[in-house]
Structure formats: structure tokens, C-alpha cells
Image: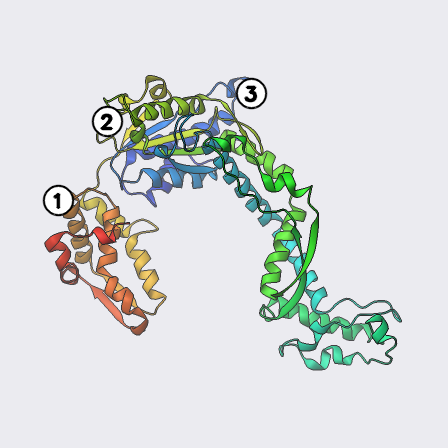
Amino acid sequence: MGLDDKLTPRQIVRELDKYVVGQEEAKKAVAIALRNRSRRQMLPLEMRDEVAPKNIIMIGPTGVGKTEIARRLARLADAPFLKVESSKYTEVGYVGRDVESMIRDLTDLAVSMLRSNHSEIVSGKATQIVENRLLDILMPPLPKRGSAQKHNPELSDLPDQIDETDQIDEIDQIDEIDQEENGFEIVEMPEDDSFARTREKIRQSLKQNKLEDKVISIEVKSSMIPMIEVFSPGGFEEMDINFKDMFSGMFPKRSKERKVSVSEARGIFMEEEFDNLIDMDKVVSEALEKVENSGIVFLDEIDKIVGRDSRTGPDVSREGVQRDILPIVEGSTVATKYGMIKTDHILFIAAGAFHSSKPSDLIPELQGRFPIRVELKSLGMEEFKRILVEPKNALVKQYMALLDTEGVKIDFAEDSIDEIASLACQINDQTENIGARRLHTIMERLLSETSFSAPEMVGQQVDINAEYVRKQLADVIEDRDLSRYIL
């Protein structure tokens, strides 16, 4: 496999442009990092292990696109991605999560992602098996002529969608013997073609979801593992014990009969068939390889673990967290319940506002492991206007689609976009600058009355212009009080 089937850095930037406005420098940095991963895979094995990823620090205020760039990059690469807040970790010896847990969490995500991918591969076969299982419950296969067949109450109330002339009433019961003693009855078999036609009609009803609400009885396997509550000191998760797996072989599984709808049964059977059809050893093996070579960890709020001038209290712990993160970033081996993970080639993208500190305040060793630094710019009016209408997930498009589900049409005039963007800039300048998140605040306030009354406005159209924006946000413009709308 060559590089021809991989996205070039320019193509990566174009894809990121669909969701993130501006920040060209940051987009180029992550595009190069992603392309270098593909280049590394083409190197000879002895050189491949020597090429380390060039980790990135993004510097910029909140709401300018740092997290979105990293998240979209991971989706482009189909890579395991984990976003964590650096401030939630503590150094060894303090109560809290240890830094190695981020690698375990990333591995769990990768296994889940790979299992989902394998589920899609076998979904066709699983669907066919589940359909046959449901069909056998609704209309069991005929035994050989003259053998005993238990009476199936599921057949007595099949819905009207199936032609009753072709149902089981065509089966003439010719003799009943030992019914009280044995609990079954002897029936004469119908003609094969008549029985086959009936089963086929039921099969078609299943495919067309006409029987989804019918209640049936199924056997569900459940493990008799007792509930265990563990009280442990901080850092206990290092042991990474999976009690369910540990005790699954010690306690027998039992079958329990449940009455569920066909729709519920379909979901239960699909999960059972996925477990039967998917080779979990292969899934785990692929997941471990994907984590080691394609994993991306986004360390947000890294400026919050920068020590201040004071060397007492929690600041000592902050520097301790940096020391604990260092071996993970520079390359170490972490034990997970699926196996050992080498972090040498995981890409780490750190981000922080650095209002009261700067990247050079990090410990020197950690600075050296983040050689690429990009500064993201604050957003202005022009960027806000583009954010409202350009991206695939633009806010204007989102609100129009949401209210369209209620039968209400929303039309934004061009001057309304200008007014919303201008107002967002004013409030960010005069209060706390929360970047593009301010647009969420304003849009929610602007359309709150329409959203509330939408069920009674079916078929109506709401035209939003600059005057409408000023009217709806008059109180906001006056006192700038948006606190109750900020998430």
C-alpha cells in the first residue's frame, strides 16, 4: 500500500475547513503530523521505529477551535481519539486518577471502535440468523411425520397482515393422545408447499417490520455473577481488574425466559450473534496495533498544570503531574486489560489558553516532547459570520433543521447574520471572551420563543432580519446578562 490512497496535507486542510473556520497555521500543523504517520508506515522496519511523532501544543483562548481541529483530524484518520482534561489527573501518591489511565481509556475506545467495525462486516449474516431465530419462534419448523409437536401459543395471535387462510388453521389436528400426561399433541402435517408459504409470509412480515410489537417468549442467558462493590485507595485502577471477566468462568450461566416484543428480541439476538460471529482475539489485536500506531490523545487545559511562583500546596502536585505525563509522552509501556501498549508513536496534542502562564513554564523535559507550537487567533466579526453559515454543521443550518421538524420554516436575512456576529463580538469584548461559544448563547436566546411555540406554529415561516435580532435581544444588549444561557 502506497501513499496515493492517503489524504495529502492540502486535502486534510480542505476537509478541516468544512468544520473549522480560520486557524490555518494549526490546520497545517496537524495535517503534516497526520501525513507523517502515513509516511512512517512506508519506511523500512528498522527506521520506522526510530521516527517519533512530532507532538503539538495549541495555544489560544477558549472557543477558537482547538478541540474541534483535533477531533475532526481523528475522524479523518479513522483513529482512536481521546480528549482528556490535564487538570483531572494527580501525581502518584495523591487521591485521583493516574495519568496512565488515559492510555487504558484510549485502548477501551479502540476495542469498541474495532468491534463496531467488525459488527458491520458480519451484520448481513447476523441479520439473516436473527431473522431465522425469530421465524422459528413464531412458527417452529415441522417435525417428521408422526412425531410429537408441542403446541405453540405464539401462532394463535399472529397479526392481521398475514392471510389467515394460509395460517396454521390449515393444519388439521386429527388426534390428541396423552395430552394431560405428556403436554403435547399429535398433529397431521400439512402439505409442504402450504406450510412453506405460511412461513414465507411471516418472514416477509418480519422484513417489513410488521410484527415489531408482537410479544414473544425468548430464552436469555444471564451470568450469576454477584454484585461487587470495591472501596479502594487512589491509584487502584492501575491494577485494571475486570471482575466480570474474572468471575465469568467461576459462576455458571443460566437461561431465563423473558417476554419481550419482536423488536426487543431482535436487538438481543443481534448482540448474541455478534458475540458468536466476531473473533474478539482479532479485534483486540487490531485495536492494540491501531492505538500504538494511530492513537491520538488530546490533552486539554495543559496550562492548568503549570506550577506558579508559589511552591506550596497544590502547585507541587501540578509539577508532579507533568513529571508523570512525561514518560507517557516520551514513550513507555502501559499495562491494560487487553495487553501491553507502547506509547512511543501515539500522537499527543496539548492545548491551553496560557492566560497566566506560557508554554516555557512547563518543565523543560516536557517542553522538549512538544516541539511544534501553534498559536490560534481570537475570532472576530468576519469569522463569526462565516461560522454561522459556512461549516457543514453551521449553527444557522442546525436551527433551521431543528425547527423544520416541527413544520416551522426559518429564514435568516443577510443583515441578521451581520447583527448576530456584531453582537457576539461586542459581548466578548466587554465581558469574558468565550470565542465561538458566544454564538450558541445568542442563537439560543434569539430563537427561544420560536422554539417554545413551534408545536403551535405548524406551517408558518419566521423571517429573521436585523430588526428582529435587536428586538429579541434588547434586554441582552442592555445588560449583557447571558449567564443563564452559558453551558
Tell me, yes or no, if residue 124 can be seen here.
Answer: yes
Looking at the image, tell me whether mark 3 or mark 2 is earlier in sequence order: 3
Residue displayed at 32% across by 34% down: 301
Is residue 11 visible to the viewer in this orientation of the structure?
A: no
For the residue pair 455 and 362, the one nearer the viewer reads as: 362
| Outermost front residue | 231
Q: Give the position of the N terminus as an image quadrant.
A: top right
Q: Is residue 198 above or below residue 305?
A: below
Give me the residue at 32% from left, 71% from top. Answer: 455
| 10 Å crowding of disc 2: few (<14), some (14-19), many (20+) | some
The residue beneath circle 2 is 357
State left or right for residue 170 relative to residue 473.
right
Task: Report if the CB atoms under discs 3 and 1 are less than 8 Å apart.
Answer: no
The location of residue 383, given as percent across then percent down, is 22, 44
Q: Quadrant of residue 468?
A: bottom left
Judged left or right of residue 79, residue 163 is right
Q: Distance from label 3 to label 1 (Cα)?
A: 56 Å
Residue 68, horizontal then vertical, whole percent: 35, 41
**Residue at which label 1 appears:** 430
Mark 1 or mark 2: name the one nearer the start of the chain.
2
Three-letter residue code for mark 3: Leu
Q: At label 2, which amino acid type do we have?
A: Ser
In the rendered image, the vertical position of residue 197 relative to residue 473, given as above or below:
below
Decide: few, some or many residues near mark 3? Use Cα within 10 Å; few <14, some 14-19, many ≥20: few
> Disc 3 designates what residue?
45
Q: Amino acid at mark 1?
A: Gln
